[in-house]
């Protein structure tokens, strides 16, 4: 191992630096930091091959903001001449992808005002409202989506509606919907929101069970899904640390 590290000199520190930066940003399993530090450049190479290389497939997605921003600008210009529901709805979707939730919500408002005959703009406006911590405003839109199609967006609509009920003090209604949704849904977001509801009522044992369910999914997940679910795993671990046993 020492001979391998010698051959990699003077690139060893650079490799370790890249590996450590990736580790901090992606937060994989903790044991990787010890492999990087104690095995030196060889450990960094092993880490980069196992953990960082699969992320290269996501690299192209990281640059999607360039054509997305271009398309946003095109739509803003187009809407001046053609303020159609379709243009506003597409603009809202792009703003959501760009993380501009307030702008997306406004675009969906205008899409709905122009044509209120499809579910999706109502649903997406409701999602924006939830993420902007305006649960009361989200409820009518999410109810509209769920009443039209109970499993809309793989039951995320129902899960977010339950969360909105919880955030507006409708705890019994929220719990009933959470229990109905989680019979078949395995969305980490729904599990964590249900756990938050239970914790808010002092039902810590049950809350811990639902947070643990998020982590239990990790065992049988393929690598790309584990990477996507890391924020949920971190949130579940944080909740388990916070809640008393």
Image (cartoon, rainbow, N blue to C red):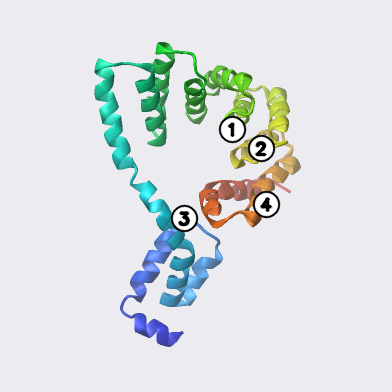
- The residue that label 1 is drawn on is 156
Q: Quadrant of residue 180?
A: top right
**Contact (CB < 8 A) between labels 2 and 1?**
yes
Instruction: Give the image location of residue 226, x and y in percent.
Output: 55, 53
- The residue that label 4 is drawn on is 216
Callout 2: helix, strand or loop?
loop
Please give the name of the residue rendered at 40% of the width and 17% of the height, measured from the top-left corner: 111
Callout 1: helix, strand or loop?
helix
- The residue that label 3 is drawn on is 26
**Contact (CB < 8 A) between labels 2 and 3?**
no
Q: Which mark is first along the chain, 4 or 2?
A: 2
Q: CA distance from mark 1 to mark 4?
A: 20 Å
Instruction: Give the image location of residue 9, x and y in percent.
Output: 33, 80
Q: Quadrant of residue 102?
A: top left
> Toward the viewer: 159 or 154?
154
- The residue that label 2 is drawn on is 185
Instruction: Give the image location of residue 2, x and y in percent.
Output: 43, 86
Front tag of 2 and 4: 2
Q: Is residue 55 left or right of residue 139?
A: left
């Amino acid at each position: 191992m020492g001979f391998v590290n010698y051959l990699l000199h003077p690139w060893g520190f650079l490799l370790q630096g890249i590996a450590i930066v990736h580790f901090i940003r992606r937060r994989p399993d903790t044991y990787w930091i010890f492999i990087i530090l104690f095995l030196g450049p060889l450990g960094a190479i092993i880490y980069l091959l196992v953990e960082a290389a699969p992320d290269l497939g996501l690299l192209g997605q990281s640059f999607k903001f360039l054509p997305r921003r271009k398309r946003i600008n095109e739509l803003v210009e187009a809407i001046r001449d053609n303020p159609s529901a379709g243009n506003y709805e597409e603009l809202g979707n792009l703003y959501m992808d760009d993380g501009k939730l307030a702008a997306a919500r406004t675009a969906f408002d205008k899409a709905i005002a122009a044509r209120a005959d499809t579910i999706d703009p109502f649903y997406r406006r409701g999602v924006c409202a939830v993420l902007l911590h305006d649960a009361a405003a989200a409820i009518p839109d999410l109810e509209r989506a769920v009443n039209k199609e109970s499993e809309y967006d793989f039951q995320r609509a129902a899960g977010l509606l339950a969360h909105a009920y919880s955030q507006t003090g409708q705890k019994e209604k929220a719990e009933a919907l959470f229990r109905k949704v989680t019979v078949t849904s395995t969305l980490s977001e729904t599990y964590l929101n249900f756990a938050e509801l239970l914790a808010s009522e002092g039902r810590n044992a049950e809350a811990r069970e639902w947070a643990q369910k998020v982590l239990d999914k990790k065992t049988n997940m393929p690598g790309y899904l584990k990477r996507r679910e890391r924020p949920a795993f971190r949130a579940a671990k944080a909740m388990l640390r916070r809640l008393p046993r």
